[in-house]
Image: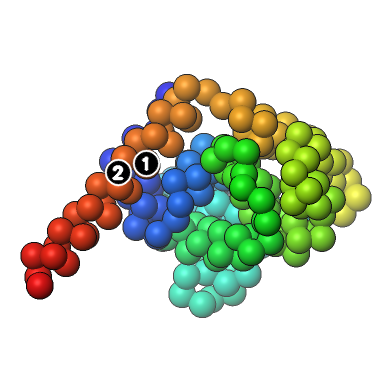
Amino acid sequence: MAVNLKSSGAKALLASGLSAAAITSALYLIVPLEGEVKNKQGLHVAYIDAVGVPTACFGDTGKDLYGRVIRKGMTYTDAECYQMLGEELKKFENEIKPLVKVPYASPFQQAGILSYTYNVGVTNFKQSTLRKKLNSGDHPGACDELLKWVYAKKIKLPGLVTRRGIERQWCVGNVSPDVKLTYSQLMLEMTAQVAAQTKRVEDAE
């Protein structure tokens, strides 16, 4: 099912200045694959992840949007979680961009690699064989490298096996019609926003 772009989460991501590929990655990969823990009041509750790291919302670690160190039990609203996700993904996009020297095979390859990098960190992506193959133009080989990233502290995790399998499918461009529709709708929405902004500037002159 195509994601509702009128939802508060989608609107928050659109407002973050992310690319259409990044927003699609967030909505279809990062949010569902990172998982979430909520209490009876519907608030997101920070938890300890599989490798012992305090984690909030959709995989956020370190500090939250208020600059506080994330600790187990801290709570966040949906709005706060999507704001943090948007801000973090923007940082990841900006850091990944200079590391990729070739055009992506598709926006879905970009989305899959962003999801992977969000999960393992930019440093790991920078040092990876995946990036080397990508920059050499070996797109299929780069996508296959995703399947190797299924260990955390030398332990093979079923959740990572599932995630990398999904990310690889995206990397090779194998996505559902709903995903393609959402991406197209995002592109139209972002084009309309740019046109509206241009008109406001012209009217003000």
Q: Is residue 8 left or right of residue 143?
A: left
Please give the name of the residue rendered at 45% of the width and 25% of the height, measured from the top-left corner: 178
* Disc 2 to disc 1, C-alpha distance: 5 Å
Q: Is residue 176 above or below residue 115?
A: above
Which image quadrant is residue 171 in? top right
* Label 1: which secondary element: helix
Q: Is residue 139 left or right of residue 1?
A: right
Farthest-out residue, bottom: 67
Q: Nearer the viewer, residue 66 or 45?
A: 66
Residue type beneath disc 2: Glu
Mark 1 closeness class: few <14, some 14–19, many ≥20 residues within 10 Å: many
Residue that badge 1 annotates: 186
Contact check, label 2 and label 1, Cβ < 8 Å = yes
The percent coordinates of residue 58 (x first, y second) are: 55, 51
Q: Is residue 53 above or below residue 195?
A: below
* Label 2: which secondary element: helix
Which image quadrant is residue 6 in? top left
Identify the image quadrant of the C terminus: bottom left
